[in-house]
Every structure is written in structure tokens, then in C-alpha cells.
Amino acid sequence: MRRCASRSSFSIDTDTTFTKVFRSDDVLFGRRRAYLKKAAQASFDGVCSGDITVMRANDKLNVRILPFVIHNEKFFDYAVKHSAGGLSPRVKFKDLANYEFLLPPKEQQAELADLLWAMDEVIEKDLEVLEKLEEFIRLKRNSLVKSGELVLLRDFIKLNYGKALKDSERVEGSFSVVSSSGIQGTHNISMAEGPGIVVGRKGNAGEIIWVPNDFWVIDTAYYVTVCEAYKSYPIRAVYYLLKSIDFKRDVIATAVPGLNRDDALNRYINIPNTTFLFEFMAQIEAIEIIKNESKSKLQSSKTLQKALINQIF
């Protein structure tokens, strides 16, 4: 979890401080761009940047409660509100020191700390399970392209340009509007049949996006169509094949980085036979179900923890 701090500062917060000493159990809060919500509890002694406010529990606060005291939206909203500056706003500790919150009696804090850390441990275990599942899927997906027919990618798929959609032209409907960042609302007109695949062209260039229904693609992305010779391949299998490709290497570093379509398609890829693909899909989709259940459990745990923290403090 991202851990936040109490109101007691260990060092003077000035614009001329370049390094600060911190101790184990202190909380390090990123006072620059507070809206990023960067805070963590140290597990060792050290020094840190002057853009970090070092906070330490006083004798009224159980040190194990420290990371949770301001781990709620109210504190971060307060920090953002009291930040000053243009492109890189900062908040000073003298302003954070005036933040008020409810603090349970000292004798109750140990019990609360046990509860909150137990919840945090559940979340960390859920995260660990999810990470292992995602890593297993990645390895499984990469193994998909290590055998089979070697085909030039441009002979397997085509990358088609999307089309800009002005706000004035957008009418809410049942078709997804997709950019390089993913699904961005709906429209009443579609450009491609779904389910389908979109590849980021500009912005989040090289990103592979699955779209479950008919969709409209704007001009920051390409949409995929399968060449005639491979029309029998399930589109979901094509998605897994493309996910195993590092399209990021074909991104041209310009003012607005973009995926070079010719370079992206000018590579060879192993295409397994359809029997193997169907077996692979059955396996991977079974794992995906477990992964989605893990995600749902993780989100429920986070929501419960957040609600409890907000209610206590």
C-alpha cells in the first residue's frame, strides 16, 4: 500500500534543504505534486531528497498507525489544496501541520493497528497471487510463438488507420470509442466489427487493446484485420499472438512518439496451427477467469480497507 504520515515532522521543510535524514518507521511524503499521492513508510535509516517531507509519530500516536493516519482522500485533497506553484506545485509542512483528523485514544490504537495491518497483509497476498498469475499468462503467451509456421506479420494482419472523432460529432450509442489508451466512451456509429484488436499508434504507442464489441477507432490508434489466408484463426488467438510481440521497439521518438506501421509489420512471427491455438485458448482463458476473480477480490479488499481508514480518521 501507499503509506502516509502523521502531523509530526522530523526535519525542517525549507526550499534550501537538499537532503534529509530519516529513520526506520518514519513516513516519507512527496510534497511535490501531491496529487500523485506518493508516500511510504521507511523500513531502514537513510537520507532523502528535499522534496520529501519526513514525518514521525509523536508520543500520542502509535507508530504502527502512522502509515494509515492520512491514507485517505481527505488528507491528499488537503495537501493538493495547500500546494503552491505552477508546473511543479509543492506543499509545505507548515501547511500540512494544520490538517486535522480524528485520533482514537492511545489504548485503542494498538488494536486498530493490528486490524489495519492484517487487512494490508491480505491485500499484499492478493497482489502477489495476481502478479504470479499475470507472469504465468505472459510466459504462456510467449511460448505460443516459439513454434509453428514462420510468417511475415504483414501477411498475417493489417493495421488500419483510425479516424478522428470531434466532440461535436460524437453521439452516445452502443459502440465503443477506442484510442491508444483504451476504450474512451461510446458512439452511435462503428468502424470495425468486434470483438477486435486495437494497436496504439500515438500516445500509448504499441499498446495492444482488446475490444469486446463493435467499435470506432480514433486517429491515435490502428485497428487490426486478419489477412484472408488466416481468417479461420479466432480473433482472440490473434490477440494473444500480438501480445507476445514487442511493438514498443518500433516506436519512433519524436515530439509525439508514434508507432511506425511499416516497421511493426516488417517482422516474422510463428503462427501455430489452429488445433494448438484452440487448446492454448482453453488453457489461457481458464487462467484469465482465475485472474479476474483475484482482481475482484483484491479490489474488494482495497475498498474495505479504504472505507475503514476513512471512517476511523
Image: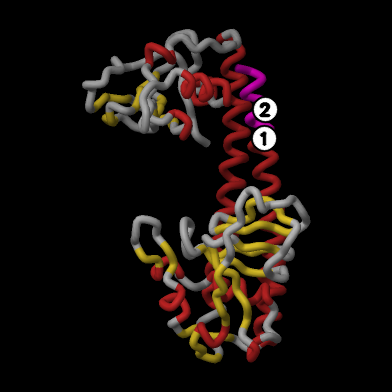
Between the residue at mark 1 and the residue at mark 2, the CA separation in whole angstroms equals: 6 Å
Q: Is residue 24 above or below residue 99?
A: below
Magenta part, dominant SS: helix
Image coordinates for residue 184, horizontal then vertical, percent: 63, 52
The crowding category of the residue bearing disc 2, from other C-alpha atoms within 10 Å (few below 14, some 14 to 19, many at least 20), is few
Q: Which residues are magenta?
A: 303-313
Q: Position of residue 138 (x, y in %)?
A: 54, 66
Assess whether mark 2 and mark 1 are in contact (beta carbons under 8 angstroms): yes
Does any portion of residue 294 appear in the rendered image? no
Please give the name of the residue rendered at 51% of the width and 25% of the height, measured from the top-left corner.
Answer: 76
Residue 137 occupies which quadrant of the picture? bottom right
Query: What type is the residue that disc 1 sits on?
Result: Thr
* Residue 306: in magenta span: yes
Q: Secondary structure at mark 1?
A: helix
Query: Magenta span has 143?
Result: no
| Residue located beneath label 1 in the image | 303
Q: Which residue is mark 2?
A: 307
Q: Is residue 299 visible?
A: yes
Residue farthest to the front, as pictured: 168
Element at label 2: helix
Please give left or right for residue 191 compared with residue 6 in the image.
right
